[in-house]
Amino acid sequence: MGIKAPVPKIKAPPMQIPVPNSPPKKAPPQPKAPIRTEVPPKEDPSLKNKEFPFNVAFPLKGPAQVYGGHREGRLINATELIEPAADQAKTFVIDAETKSLGNPNLRKTFGTFYTVDFIKKFADFIYPIFKTTIRVNDISRRTGGVIMYYNRNHKKWEEQHSWHRVGLDADIEYHDAKGREFSTEQKWFMFKSIGVSPLVNEIMIVEKDRRAVCEFIKKSNDLDEKTKMVIKKLYVEAGHERHFHINFNCTYNEACAQGETDIMPAQYEKNCAACMAHIRPGASCDSSR
């Protein structure tokens, strides 16, 4: 009887949080358009009947990218979101602070393949309808984990997010690239477009915006089954006054892909459960959270 060779155990690399001894160098000054309350150019109503193509091509095999739960895990084999090239339509821009032009090691432009692909498709979808360029804020660091920022008022490094740790979170500004604020109708159109996707777990907003959206839904009589489903995904959480936060579901491929990975075989089941367990109870426009 032959003797089976032992399966080597490969430990996942330790989470690294970049906390330099000195304050980061300030990024080059970026021109910022003033925040204006006017809405972007007139939309094409005929395009509003289109549905967001949220389905993505899932790779059959490949490395797992998510390690651990949404709020205590980290990111491996990250995919970076890169702005469109000069010869392409400027469907989205990335916030200068998110790109951390002064310190590339602090960039927050990384996510899973599905997160990055979703953001690109969403920007491509919105661009011809709103005739404007959306602004993308924080996603995750290259290795995930805690995001730190230097508080110049307190002169120390502090934790910036309780989310954005595994590449499954993305912030989208309520203002376009020129600083023009989206209307409540436009916000709801964006929420509903992405909220019907099974890839989207939650859309985090503040109570004021949730109430405004619910009032708009009632006045416009937009009370179909898709609306009810999306409303359950609108979760009120402080700190989202200037942007909405998309929290993506953890797919089998992201947490459990049995391919090239640094997660030990015995940890697959535990890792899948930790990543896929994050579901909070839904609500309706007639209830509060």
Image (cartoon, rainbow, N blue to C red):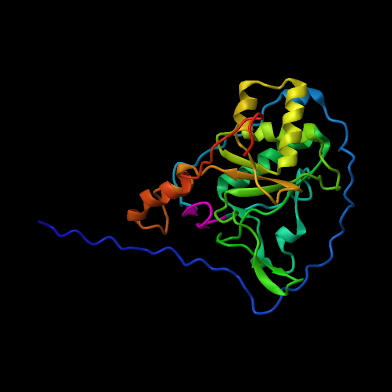
Pick the residue in front: 126 or 241. 241
**Closer-to-camera residue (86/257):** 257
76 within the magenta span: yes
For residue 178, above or below residue 146: above
The residue sitting at 87% across, 38% down in the picture is 39
Where's residue 282, x and y in %?
57, 35
Q: Is residue 257 visible in the rendered structure shown here?
A: no
Question: Does residue 79 appear left or right of residue 89 in this picture?
Answer: left
Of 105 and 181, nearer the camera is 181
Left/right of residue 37 with respect to residue 230 in the rendered view: right
What residue appears at the point 78 percent right and 47 percent down from the top-left corner?
Answer: 87
| Quadrant in the picture for the N terminus | bottom left
Tell me where residue 270 appears, x and y as whole percent: 38, 51
As rendered, which of 100 and 162 lies closer to the eye? 162
Magenta extent: 66-78
Is residue 110 placed above or below 42 in the rendered structure? below
